[in-house]
Structure formats: structure tokens, C-alpha cells
Image: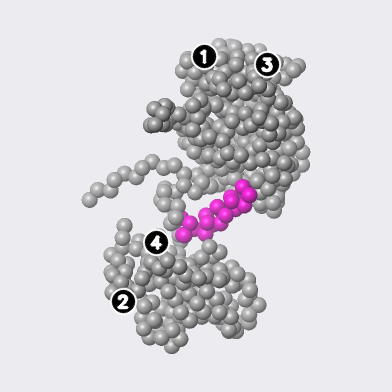
Amino acid sequence: MINKTKKEKLDKIYEKGIDPYPSVFKVDSDSKEIKTKFKGLSKGEHTKKKVSIAGRIMQSRPMGKACFMNLLDKEGKIQLYFRHDDIGKEEYKKLKLLDIGDIIGIKGTVFMTKTGETTIHVDSFQLLTKSLEQLPEKWHGLKDQEIRYRKRYIDLISNRDVFDLFIKKTEFIKNIRKFMDGKGFMEVETPVLEAVPGGADARPFITHHNTLDIDFYLRISLELHLKRLIVGGYDRVYEIGKVFRNEGLSTQHLQEFTLLEFYAAYMDYNDLMDFTEEFFKTIIKQTFGTLKIKFQGNEINFSGKWPKIDYTKIIKEKTGIDLNKEDTKEKLISAIRKKGLKIDIDENLGRGRVMDQLYKQYVRPNLIQPCFLINHPIDISPLAKKHKDNPKLTQRFQLLVAGSEIVNAFTELNDPIDQRERFEEQMKLREAGDEEAQMIDEDFIESLEIGLPPTGGFGMGIDRFFAILTDQDTVREVVLFPMMKPEEEKRD
């Protein structure tokens, strides 16, 4: 809402013939460059070096015929010093038309105050943007979490740690790209709108194409189109892209998030585990300078060799249920109830979904240090290749960190007949009421019939993992504009 006092000042600015929203101002320095270049100045020492800088006024301290301001630019804050005798009476009067939040450009010389603060002695200044709304309380920044997410632009101005967090996230993603490119992968883009959603167990969003008069789905995964590219002859491909899942919100889940997926011909899940260790150790070290991070009171150590944990064995250890013995949905549900385990069971769901609920409730939260969970049953792995020695298990692994799934990866199923049978089983579950079960994608099956070479595939939610690496208690903290409910209309 426009602030009345600021609007009155804007009117006075127009009356003086000043443009409060000019098109350009030439900048040759930023606050960090100036502080770095002149850090060796003695207290009270002045230079003749002229600089031109622009930013937002965050504090103003008028003192008669002198005024100090703090200016915020992309690199941080720097102090400005205005003196009546230097800029002239009329220009000095214009300072009264400026407010906290206004963006100004200044030119001046650098000096070190007697208290040791690098400061710009202003020769001239120009209003670049008149701010018409009050910023939050200037000393403590914006604290209300909902406002912070809904009005991220204010959050970034008010909270420097948030501003720096997203710079770090950009660096993290750049390091991912650098690693993948260095390993011979080609970055590609695949469709966001799909006739058949696939590649994950998730409920999709539906949209409508007006010209074609056809419903489409927003993609829930990047998988099936990337594997088509492997069929087409590219040996190594990856994509960093948005995916959309119409499911519940939580501290670890958003309905729109950023996914990294890659596929490599002639690699299996054992190769992928070695690759994954190297990948994470490299990008974490490059981004944070260490392989030890703090998360919610725990120290997580990414160095050393990561252990491999058997899915069936860990469930038996944590719950007392033997998945090899309880080999039907009915037997599994009966065993869960006999042991008094507290999970919500939907009778319409398949054995795999019930098993997954058991794992998520009693196993996953206890896996804090990096580890590979392996030997998943086929019931929960419709796109993974079977083990040759045990066709009830798949060549799949998940990377677990801090009780969260970070990576899902497997040796890809490339037998088109087997894939069709598994899709058909998924469709039966879907028809029985499981809205997250996968649909049959005939074109994808045809691509497998053309021939997918032996291939390893990897998927990682970037936002969730970055939230862990930066010790955030919710994934919303690392997404610039997380989805929010519409604001209720304000009434008089």
C-alpha cells in the first residue's frame, strides 16, 4: 500500500522537475570492491579516487549540515557521507525528499572514517527510484514467515542471510552443471506438458490445450523422455528442470520443485553408486569448502565410503516384519496390524504402497548419515531392472541423508515386454483407486522396442538436498517463490 508521506514527497519531486524514475545511471563499482580495494587506508585518510555506485537507502542519519546514509547494493552495505558545503545548499535540501527504501546513484571519493569505516564522500547524487511503500522495521529485518515467502523481494532486502543463501544455491547448481559437463553429459530440455505422465508415482496436475481441445498433464518426472534420448543414440544426458506433483505439502515436499535427472548408457546401479559418491563429494566440497555439515543439531559427514543397507533387512530390523514371508498385500497388512504398527492403511493400495508407508514411518527417519538403500522389491520399482539372481528384487538404490531420500537411481528396465507387464499392473492399481500409480505410455514402450542399451538412471530433488546442506527446517526456505494460498481479500 502506498505510504501517504512518501507519495507527498513524490509529488514535490515532480514539482521540482526531477524525474524520480530515470532510465539509466552509470555504475563502475560495488560496495565489496570498494571495501576490498581501500581496506588498507589509515583511519581518517582520504583519497582522490572517484567511484560511482548505486543502491537502496537503508538508513539515514542527518546531523545539521552533514548526513550519513547506509547504501545497500548486491554485495552488501556501505556508508555514504553528504556535506552541505560540498554538494551545495539546493542539492542538500533534496536529501529531505529521500526515504528509506529509495534507490539512488552517487558519485564521490573514498575515505576511512576515524572509527575505521570505509565511506564514500558524496560529490553528487541522483534519485533513481522513489519507493512508495514502507520497508519492515529497519533494525531487525522481516520475521513473519508467511510474508517472507509471499513477498520474497522484501525478504531479500531485509534479510542479508536469505539474499546470500540464494547466491549459494546458484553456485551449487553451477557446480552440478560443471561436474556433469566434465563427465561428458549433454544438458537437454524435455517437454513440460505430456499426454501421459510417467517416471514417478505421483498424482499429476491437469491442464487443457484450447487449440487442440486436449487435456495434458504437467510432468511429474523427467525420466521417460530422457530415456528416449538414450534410445536415439545420446550416451549421456541430463536435465535440471521443474516438475509438478499434485500432492500434499510438507517441510520436505512442494508441488513444484527442481529435479536433476541423468541417464548414462552402459552403466548399472553399482557404477551409479560410485559415480554418486564422487558427484556429491565434489560439488559439496566446491560449494561449502567442507564435507561435514550441520543439520538440525546433527553433524553429517559425507567423507569416507558410504555404507549399503538392504531394504528388506532394515525393515525387519526396525519393525520385525519379514517382507519375504509376508509376500502378499493381505499378509503384509495382517502382520502390520498384529504388531500394532501405526500406519494409515488404504485397502485400495497395492502391496508396494503399503510397504513404502511402513518404510517411511519406521526406517527412513533413522538413517541420518549418508547411506545407500539397496535391493528394493519389484512392487515399488516399476521402472527398475530385476536382479538376475532374485527376480522379486530390483537393481535400484536410494541415497538417504538426514532421514530424507535424496537420490533415487537404478539400472533401467529395457525389456519392453517386462515393462508393459509392469505398466499393466500399475494400471490395475490405478483403476482400483491408487491415483499415484503409473499409466501406460505406449510411445515409451515403442522406444524400448526400438532398443534401449544397458542404462543407469539417477534423480535428485535439488531443493530438498540444498535445504539439508544449509540447515533449513523447511524446503520453502530455499525456493525463491514457494507456492502459497491466495491472500484473503482485505476488507474495510
Residue linked to disc 1: 428
**Comparing labels 2 and 4, the label whose residue is closer to the camera:** 2
Q: Which residue is mark 4?
A: 135
From the viewer's side, name the closer residue of 468 and 76: 76
Q: Quadrant of residue 211?
A: top left
Q: Which residues are magenta?
A: 155-174
Q: Which residue is mark 2?
A: 16
Say left or right for 445 vs 62. right
Q: Is residue 253 visible?
A: no
Which of pointers 1 and 3 lies earlier in the amino acid sequence? 3
Find numbered disc 1 in the image and state the secondary structure of the residue it sits on.
helix
Q: Position of residue 160 (x, y in %)?
A: 52, 59
Q: First in sequence, mark 3 or 4: give its number.
A: 4
Instruction: Give the label, 2 or 3, closer to the camera.
Output: 2
Looking at the rendered structure, the secondary structure element under dot 3 is: loop
Find residue 114 and name its label: none
Q: Which is more foreground, mark 1 or mark 2?
A: 2
Q: Amino acid at mark 4?
A: Leu
**Kind of residue at badge 2:** Lys
- Measured in 3D between alpha carbons, the distance from the residue under mark 1 to the one under mark 2, in whole angstroms, is 74 Å
Earlier sequence position, callout 1 versus callout 4: 4
Query: What amino acid is at disc 3?
Result: Lys
Q: Helix, strand, or loop for circle 4?
A: loop
Whether residue 81 is situated above or below residue 444 in the rendered picture: below
Identified by mark 1, the residue type is Lys
Which quadrant of the figure has residue 221?
Answer: top right
